[in-house]
Each structure stands twice: as structure tokens, then as C-alpha cells.
Image (cartoon, rainbow, N blue to C red):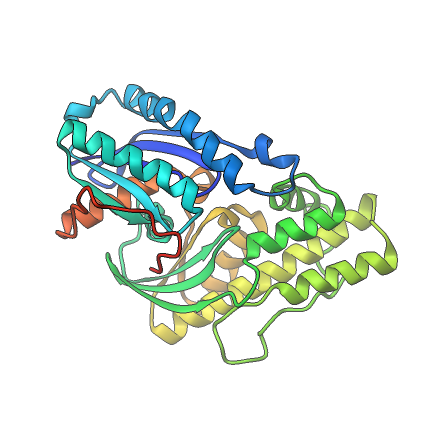
Amino acid sequence: MLVLGIETSCDETAAAVVRDGREILSDVVSTQIEIHRRWGGVVPELASRNHVLQVMPVVDEALEKSGVTLDEIDGIAVTSGPGLIGALLVGVQVGKSIALAKKKPIVGVNHLEGHLLAVRLGADAPAPPFLGLVVSGGHTSLYAVRDYGDYRLLGATLDDAAGEAFDKVGKLLGLPYPAGIVIDQLAQTGDPKAIKFPRGLTKRATLDFSFSGLKTAAMYHLQKHGIPEGQALADFCASVQEAIADVLTRKAVKAAKEAGLPRLVLCGGVAANSRLRALAVERGAEAGIDVHVPEKRLCTDNGAMIAVAGYETFRRGGGPSGLDLNANPAWRL
């Protein structure tokens, strides 16, 4: 089955063609980082307008690179939530237009399900059951994945998402957006024990997260000591990164053990962070849990993961959605 996946939930315009939910024939992403960098974060209206300009060229390129025509596509999968309402509407309307013009079935996909299933595109792809840690700029959640379509939320952030915490601390440091990548690079030569930043909610039984305390502690540290440079900056970044990775991996392993799940899957943009990946593998091995992480390009938003989620929906008889499909910015998985 050939599925065209379209993703426009935030600031990446993406499209991909995937065969049978496993083989990527094409995967095209047009990023908006340079557009939003001057503002220090995503500006929803600018994101929506850029999606309008980029979505059809991206879809055309994905089809061209796959060697597949729209007539040969068996189904269309489009992100319909959660995300920015204006951005989502662009992808949904384009998907429905193609579906109507070519008489193809279409299914709306939850963005978080796309992240959870991105690991299916790897060579050693795990099948459910597994524990999924979805960690990005807008989401930090733990899901028990018993089967495709069977997801149970075990814990989530009560305030800032992990990626949001990276970006906010980076903004305090005067680093360019998105700051998570820069902090990861600076942290490579830093001492993660140099500064003891707080680990939110780790002294409670809850599987929920909180990163607002870390952000506040980082702000007070900078107000007291000033913006660090050189080795001090590397130590600061390494300490912040360690605090975030420590909490994420500690709670993910705990959740997997409590739920009796033998595998842990990291996904979402922050899953590209080198320390998070290494610490997850280390702690998973200690707990007897297999850890799986998609390659970095599949951690960030992309159309291939949406095509995979759409394929699984079609396969289990969950589609099509129909041409009354609409965007749902608050869609809970």
C-alpha cells in the first residue's frame, strides 16, 4: 500500500511517500527555522502563511522523488492535530483537495501517533507493546503502546515541555533558535555536574514532568553570575542538559517497568539530543529494557511518520476519515 503523508502541524512543511508502512520512497521537509529565528520562536501566523507557499511544491517533490504519481497512491494521511490551528488547516485542506480530485481515501492522523510510530521506519523496528516517550518542543508525554491504535497516557508535563525548556534557557543565554541543538553542541565539552539544577517531580510517585523549576533556576543563576563564556558556558549547558535527560530517562524507565513493557521507544525532536539518547540506552540496559531510537531525521517532524500512522489506521480498518475531516489543535491521543 502506497501512502502519501502530509505534515504541517507547526513550522515544518513535509510530505513523504511510504510503502506498506515500512519503506520510505521519499521524504521531503521544508523548514522554517530561518523565518522564526529572528523572533526567538515560532510565530503561528508566519508559520501558516509559509505552509501555504510551500505545501504543494513539497508534495510535488515528494511524488517526483518517489517515482510515484498521485494516481498510483492508495491513500492519503494528513496531520489533523494537535498543533497550530492555522498550520494544521493548510495540510488538511490540501489533503482533502487531493483526495477529492483523485478519488482517494484520506485519514486524519494524530501528530503524536506519528512520532510514536516513526521507529517503524528503522531497520530493527520494534513492534508493540512498548513504552513511548514523546519529547519535543510542544510535548513531553509517556504512552503505553499496547498495540497500534491502543495508546494509554501514563504521564505528561504539567508546564513546559522539555524542548521548550531548552529553548527558553537558550534564549536567556542569547543562543539562536532552536537552542536545543546549540546547547547539545556546547555541552559536549562541559561538565554535567558543574551546576546542580533541580529535577522536577522526581521525589514523588507521579510519572508527570515539570521543567518550569529548571528554567527559573537557570534564570536566577544567570542573574547572579552573569552570562557565562568559554568553559563556563559549556559547563552550564551540560548541567542543564543533564538535568533534563536525567528526569526524562529516569521516569521513562520507571514507567516501562511499572507497566511491564519490555521496550522503550524515544521519539520527537528532543530524542535527537545526544545525551538523552546515550543515557536512555545506559539506563535501559541496567533495567533490562531494550531502547529504540529512530535516526535523528525521523525524530523531528516529517511526512514519513504521518504516512506510517496513516497506513496502520487504514490497515486496521480505522479509515477513511471522509471529506468532513477538520483540524483539531487540541486532539488528545
Q: Does the rendering let one see residue 28?
A: yes
Q: Quadrant of residue 255?
A: bottom left
**Residue 5 point in image, percent of width and height:** 29, 36
Q: Position of residue 311 (x, y in %)?
A: 21, 44
Seen in the picture, residue 19 relative to 127 is either above or below; the reply is above
Image position, residue 212 (x, y; %): 63, 64
Q: From the viewer's perspective, tell me whether residue 80 is left or right of residue 52.
A: left
Q: Which residue is the extreme one toward the right?
A: 225
Above-or-below relation of 49 to 265: above
Q: Quadrant of residue 146?
A: bottom left
Q: Is residue 296 left or right of residue 317?
A: right
**In this picture, is 91 found above or below 193?**
above
Q: Nearer the viewer, residue 100 or 108?
A: 100
Residue at (56%, 34%) from the top-left corner? 33
Q: Is residue 101 above or below residue 301?
A: above
Q: Whole-percent x and y of residue 74?
A: 15, 33
Which residue is at 19% across, 39% downward? 20
User: Who is closer to the viewer here, 307 or 131?
Assistant: 307
Residue 73 at least partly seen: no
Where is the C terminus found, in terms of image quarters?
A: bottom left
Q: Quadrant of the N terminus?
A: top left
